[in-house]
Amino acid sequence: MLNMFVKKSAEELYVDVELSDGRRMSLEDLVRDYERLLKNETSKKENFKKEVIPKVKDDKVITKKLRVGEWFRIDRNVIDENRNEIYRKCIEEGTAGKKLWVRFEKSNKIANQYPRQYPRLIETYIFEARGYYITQQKKRDMCKYVGDGMCDEIICDLELQMRICNGESLYDLIYKHDELPRTRVIKLRNGGTGYFGGGVDNHKNYPTADLRRYKFDPNYESCMNVPYAFRRVL
């Protein structure tokens, strides 16, 4: 067998190889092309990590207040223990509260059906805003680099319930403008793109619990929203 890690003469290295498209080239040229492509791909990944990873502060888990640039823990056991209290608060808020409760119940059912996808402990992360345009695909890639991917609508509803358990006002979540700087972009379960909450920096007056649904366009660029990532705590 030819050892590619031992220096050989040009004649010894020349092995004719047929590619899948019918082209023929020497094994030496094929190896050189592969090494060049591998180097370029590695360089792209390292540059992307330098851009994304340093923004993540992983030294602290926030359990009571959702903040940009810090991990927020969702404990589904706590949500289950406070189910009756969440229901009561939703009913007290009238029609909007009742609609939100129906949404919670649907999301909780899905979470129970897929325990590996939605374990009992989940942590979420809101990226800091960048000063330039980023495509939807890149935002999804950013979430994979820091965790298990981009949050979906189920995790968003679990987050809202956890915030209620932590003492936040349901009235504020439903009616008041979101206090976070930017709207969060999420990946819907059907593959589409969702926008969660509002963003005071951009004068978007959407309430915190507001969720809009659109088709996924990987090349669509925006600087008006930030990725919302999650990681499973097993």
Image (spheres, grey):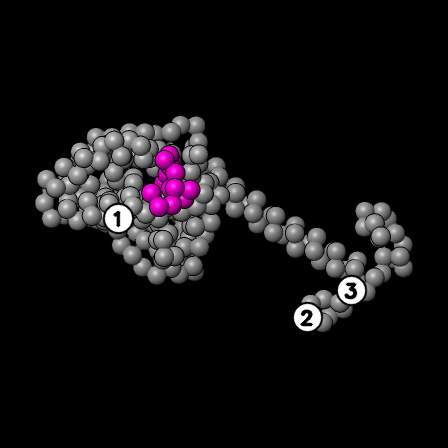
Q: Earlier in the sequence, mark 2 or mark 1?
A: 2
Going by the numbered disc 2, the residue's amino acid type is: Asp
Q: In the displayed structure, does residue 233 sit left or right of residue 205?
A: right
> Which three-letter amino acid code belongs to the residue tagged 3?
Val
Is 127 a magenta residue?
yes
Q: Nearer the viewer, residue 175 or 78?
A: 78
Residue 44 part of the magenta segment: no
Q: Residues within 10 Å of mark 3 (few under 14, many from 20)?
A: some
Query: Which region of the structure is painted magenta?
Result: 112-128
Q: How far apart in space, not on screen, are marks 3 and 2 (Cα)?
A: 11 Å
The structure residue drawn at horizontal position 61% and vertical position 51%, both measured from the top left corner, is 41
**Secondary-structure class at tag 3:** strand
**Relative image position of residue 215 (x, y in whole percent):** 35, 61
Provide the residue designation for mark 3. Answer: 17
Residue 74 rendering spot, x and y as whole percentages: 33, 35
Q: Position of residue 68 (x, y in %)?
A: 34, 37
Q: The residue tagged with tag 1: helix, strand or loop?
A: helix
Residue 57 screen position, x and y as percent: 43, 32
Q: Is residue 71 above or below residue 216?
A: above
Per the model, the C-alpha gap separating discs 2 and 1 is: 50 Å
Q: Is residue 175 visible?
A: no
The three-letter amino acid code for the residue at tag 1 is Lys
Would residue 166 appear left or right of 221 to someone viewing this image?
left
Q: Which residue is mark 1?
A: 106
Residue lying furthest bottom in this view? Answer: 22
Which callout, 1 or 3, points at the residue further toward the start of the chain? 3
Which residue is depicted at the point 43% across and 60% down?
219
Question: Label 2 belongs to which residue?
Answer: 21
